[in-house]
Image (tube, coloured by chain):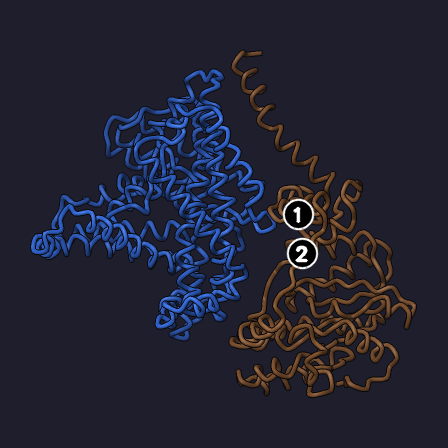
Chain colours: A blue, B brown
Amino acid sequence: MCWKVEYIVLIITSTLIDYFVAQKMAALKEKFKRKKWLLISLFSNLGILFGFKYFNFVNANVQALFDNFNIFYGVPAFDVLLPVGISFYTFQTLSYTIDVYNGKTPVQNHLGIFAVYVSFFPQLVAGPIERSRHLLPQFYVEHKFSYDRVKYGLQQMLWGFFKKLVIADRLAIVVDGVYNNLDNYSGFSLVVATFFFAFQIYCDFSGYTDIAIGSARVMGFELIDNFKRPYFSKSISEFWKRWHISLSTWFRDYLYIPLGGNRVVKWRWYYNLFITFLVSGFWHGANWTFLVWGALHGTYLIMAIVLIKPKKYILNMLNLKGSFIYKIYRVTFTFTLVVFAWIFFRANNISDAFYVINNMFSDIGDYTDFGKMKLSLRGLGVGMNDILISVGLITFMELYNLYERSGDVWEKLENKPKWIRWSIYYILLFGILFLAPYSRVSNFIYFQF
Amino acid sequence: MNKEVKILLRKGSVFMLPIIAWIYIVIVVDPFNYFNVSNFISEKAKEKSAQQLNSLLYNTVNFRNNPTNSIIIGDSRIRKLPTEKIKQLTGDDYYTMHSNAAKLNEIIDLFWFSDSLWCSDNYTNLENVIIGINFNLYNEYAYSNRVTDVKKILDNKFIYIFNWNILETIYLALKNEFFGLKPNEKKDKEEFWDYTIKTIAKNHYSKYKHPKETLLRLEEMGAYCKANDINLILLIVPHYKEFHNRLVEFDLAEEENAYKNEIKNIGRVIDYDFPNSITNCKSCFSDPIHTTDSIGEIMVNEIFSDSLTIGRGL
């Protein structure tokens, strides 16, 4: 991920192509005639994305393949850096042309407003990936200053900064320390780092989303939700309705359903699921680790369908259906599967991921010995107090999420006395100021995609 | 101006008052002498609280405020070398840049930091450097990265003002100033002695990996000192024999020999951690790894009068 002023040409190119393609499509009544314009949009947008994000990966793998057969392959690598936000705005602008093609959204005649839609700064670099139907009409509404709206936006930004700077960046110290020096770690340290990564990425990404939604709200714009307490999901399919919602719905609407969705024969349904998640993994980055991560989630979903009947039979036999214990089990099991997949997402390469999997339980016999556990945490680069503070912050964040289940936390706070509200603001603000590891602040993880 | 904008500005200003008040408190109390503009708190209260909670930051800021050409860098063990005595013997002002539980990579970072201050401000070099380096530091697992944090604090006032560690130190400094300095709580010597032999030795020696990269950095530092006429001494301070035996119990005797061999080409190495009259004498130590003040004086006498009797050159 990199910022270079020349890369502005890319977003301008995408904007101009999609603006004119949509104009052309709107002028044509027959769908088959519109198709060639849609293909121009798809090829040009995905072509730019491929060139900047995937070419070197594909090239390196083809090179390795040719080397295996001792065949000369002289295509050089493309010396470019990944432009910031390219995956996000490409998908946002593509959704517009596909919707115009399908007649689901009216064509946008004002080039300036369309350009603002593509480059709307709060969500430009890491989403949420907006749909034209939702965002474009908002540019035509006059946004008068509203104290309540600005306050609500600032509250959401405050919570987002807290998640990013206080929780995610604190967890990142342990996670990066371990995952970037795997040779030095085994056993419990790997378990702790992997568990922490699950919350690091959630707080990092949902923190960014809250800041984006909050800052848009300050200006009078409403963006779509991207997260709904994903780690309380009771199944993987539910997880994907709660995690990075704007991307999962994008893939559902523009890939999974066009492939046939679930209204096909079973094997084809499995195929559609698998391909959708494989592509979703690849969207995240040009690395085998992301492909495996996507494939794992696809496999989880297929297995969930395959095992529906035996699961029902066992549940009926044990009379567990609907019980609280079963709900807890489902949440825990889903979380474990998600965390397992995160290993591939975080690892720098496939062999690192397998190192983590093979070594994370190497000292499982010591897990009941607190002294030994403490010793294995030595060398994580932080003290025991920091580990406890991190666990405390994760608990605090999940309690917030639990409280949010019955309605928006900030709306609920409005009914509380002023001293309670201001105390909470100060706790969060001073938490950001004093607990964030400012000397080790890291970039938002999703900026690299 | 819109009425609602006025409400936001008014409430926002009131909301910001505690933050402004905090900035004022930090500048006035300033336990690490970072701004070095206020004497509201006595130097004694500042030093006691700052050394207790962040000796690395305190020593680094003080060195930045009053740099010397000669420095001693290491962990708490190196603190026992009396700088006044060294001045008597050599006429040089030494500054002890110690940090509690410092790691070798941090000690090297501190060397470069000290050198950079001289290079950037005065266009002169350091002249004398003593590095405290014991075997437990010579381990890839003995790694920490606090100097980077300290450098960022030195470069950025915001990080100093809004820092949990500074908040704690300010509280302690105010407590020390207004409620009197309390003497350090005396630990039960025997209990702490046992703890050091059992637990600290285990922490030091149970996990070992040769520090390949740190050795390269040490060699780079040694070469730089040679090239710039900096007198570099690597000092291995003594440990009580019972503590040293733990190293053997963890099967690291060979690694210890290798370490001494590897560092002897980097600079002048003076070793006190081998069976000798200090390591055999329990009363020479306040705990198994920290010598008493009188032993510190003996070492200084030997090192600076070039007459090693107990210690040995490698």
Q: Between B211 and B143, which is closer to the camera in this rendering?
A: B143
Q: Which mark is residue B52?
A: 2
Closer-to-camera residue (B23/A84): B23
Task: Please report the residue visible at 47 percent of the width from the left and 30 percent of the height from the top.
Answer: A155
Q: Secondary structure at mark 2?
A: helix
Q: Nearer the viewer, residue A92 or B270?
A: B270
Q: Residues within 10 Å of mark 1 (few under 14, many from 20)?
A: many
Q: Residues within 10 Å of mark 2 (few under 14, many from 20)?
A: some
> Residue visible at 42% across and 48% down?
A394
Specify the quadrant of the image occupied by residue B257. bottom right
Tell me whether marks 2 and 1 sit on the same chain: yes
Residue A295 visible somewhere in the drawing: no
Chain containing mark 2: B
Tell me where residue A344 appears, x and y as whole percent: 37, 60
Helix, strand or loop at mark 1: helix
Locate residue A58, reporting x and y percent.
41, 59
In the image: residue B299, left or right of residue A260: right
Q: Which mark is residue A336?
A: none
Q: Amino acid at mark 2?
A: Gln
Would you say A147 lies left or right of A18 here? right
The answer to whether residue A320 is left or right of residue A343 is left
Q: Position of residue B275 (x, y in %)?
A: 69, 88
Chain to which the residue tagged by mark 1 belongs: B
Q: Nearer the viewer, residue A416 or B222?
A: A416
Label 2 – label 1 distance at C-alpha: 9 Å
Give coordinates of residue A69: x percent, y percent: 38, 74
In this picture, residue B247 sits left or right of residue A351: right
Q: Are marks 2 and 1 in contact (CB under 8 Å)?
A: yes
Three-letter amino acid code of the residue under disc 1: Leu
Q: Is residue A294 visible?
A: yes
The correct choice, above or below, for A372 with respect to A407 in the image is: below
Q: Label 1 belongs to which residue? A: B172
